[in-house]
């Protein structure tokens, strides 16, 4: 099977690839080249990699940001319609942040609407089926999945990671005090943390700086996969439970 997950940015793609490797067993496959999609919408925040488990391939595409979904989906759907049977995609998943005060139905309807000339059904944290017609007029069925994170409140990937780190009392104190510190200093640091999204990033960066001070100058994406065993965090296992089921469907 060929599956693909679209997520907002590079950091999302790094975390998902790490997590799905540890939990589902997908290993990076450098031999499979993506030359069908036009990448480069936002090079600083975009990443596409292929992963493989047995005969199943998983593409994870950090598309460059929430505002890139329309163009990325259009690119992907054009490939989907033209792909021969041997290269056909069997499933598409979308992971996006809950960082706007818009209800799930509106978000999912917008994502579905980006698939022009197709009947794509996305439901939050549920596996569904969509259908479309390829370039030869043949009807095809594709599994669909959407995950809006976090599930319980507004936020983003950083919210999810901070919540996951609260799984033990020791790290909970670090998270809570880092949260307090960033909130307190925000007014004095408005030049650097101008938006709520940047406040979230500052909170996570503060936690990582405390947990791994010797790596404070490393890139955040490297810290993500070397600092914490995310696959052992109960919160993430619950959050990504249906996503794992979606990824594992069709395994032999």
Image: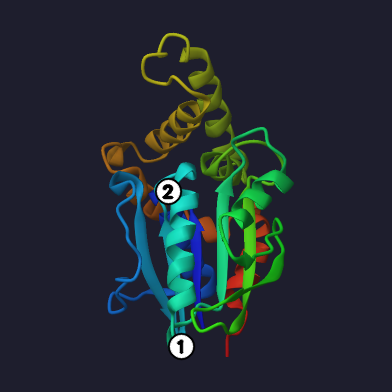
Q: Which mark is residue 128?
A: none
Q: Residues within 10 Å of mark 1 (few under 14, many from 20)?
A: few
Looking at the picture, tell me which residue is in the foreground, 11 or 44.
44
**Colour style of the rendered protein structure:** rainbow
- Where is residue 103 shown, x and y percent of the image? 72, 40
Q: Residues within 10 Å of mark 2 (few under 14, many from 20)?
A: many
Q: Residue furthest top?
A: 188
- Quadrant including the C terminus: bottom right
Q: Which residue is mark 2?
A: 9
Looking at the picture, tell me which residue is in the foreground, 25 or 93.
93
Q: How many marks?
A: 2
Q: Which element is circle 2 on?
A: loop
| Quadrant housing residue 172 | top right
Residue 156 in the figure: left or right of residue 107: left
CA–CA distance in space, label 1 to label 2: 27 Å
Q: Which element is circle 1 on?
A: loop
- Where is residue 93 shown, x and y percent of the image? 57, 64
Residue 230 in the figure: left or right of residue 208: right
Q: Residue at x 45, y 33 (%)?
A: 201
Q: Is residue 14 visible?
A: yes
Q: Which residue is mark 1?
A: 55
- Where is residue 171 shown, x and y percent of the image? 55, 39
The relative height of residue 68 versus residue 187 in the rendered view (above or below) is below
N-term-proximal mark, 1 vs 2? 2
Residue 186 in the figure: left or right of residue 147: left
Q: Residue at x 52, y 32 (%)?
A: 174
Q: Is residue 18 visible?
A: no
- Where is residue 61 shown, x and y percent of the image? 42, 60
The relative height of residue 207 versus residue 167 in the rendered view (above or below) is above
């Amino acid at each position: 099977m060929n599956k693909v997950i679209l997520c907002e940015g590079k950091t999302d793609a790094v975390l998902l690839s790490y997590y799905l490797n540890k939990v589902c067993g997908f290993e990076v496959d450098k031999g499979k080249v993506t030359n069908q999609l036009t990448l480069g919408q936002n090079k600083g925040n975009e990443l596409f990699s292929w992963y493989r488990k047995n005969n199943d391939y998983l593409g994870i595409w950090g598309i460059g940001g929430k505002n890139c979904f329309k163009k990325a989906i259009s690119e992907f759907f054009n490939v989907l319609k033209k792909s021969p049977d041997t290269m056909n995609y069997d499933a598409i998943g979308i992971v996006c942040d809950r960082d706007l005060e818009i209800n799930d139905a509106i978000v999912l309807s917008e994502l579905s609407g980006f698939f022009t000339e197709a009947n794509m059904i996305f439901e939050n944290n549920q596996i569904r089926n969509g259908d479309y017609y390829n370039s030869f007029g043949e009807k095809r069925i594709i599994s669909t999945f959407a995950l809006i994170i976090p599930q319980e409140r507004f936020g983003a990937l950083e919210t999810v990671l901070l919540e996951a780190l609260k799984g033990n009392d020791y790290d909970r104190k670090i998270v809570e005090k880092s949260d307090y510190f960033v909130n307190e200093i925000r007014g004095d640091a408005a030049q650097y943390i101008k938006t709520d999204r940047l406040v979230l990033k500052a909170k996570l960066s503060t936690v990582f700086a405390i947990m791994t001070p010797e790596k404070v100058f490393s890139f955040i994406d490297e810290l993500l996969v070397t600092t914490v065993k995310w696959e052992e965090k109960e919160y993430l296992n619950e959050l990504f439970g249906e996503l794992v089921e979606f990824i594992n469907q069709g395994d032999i």
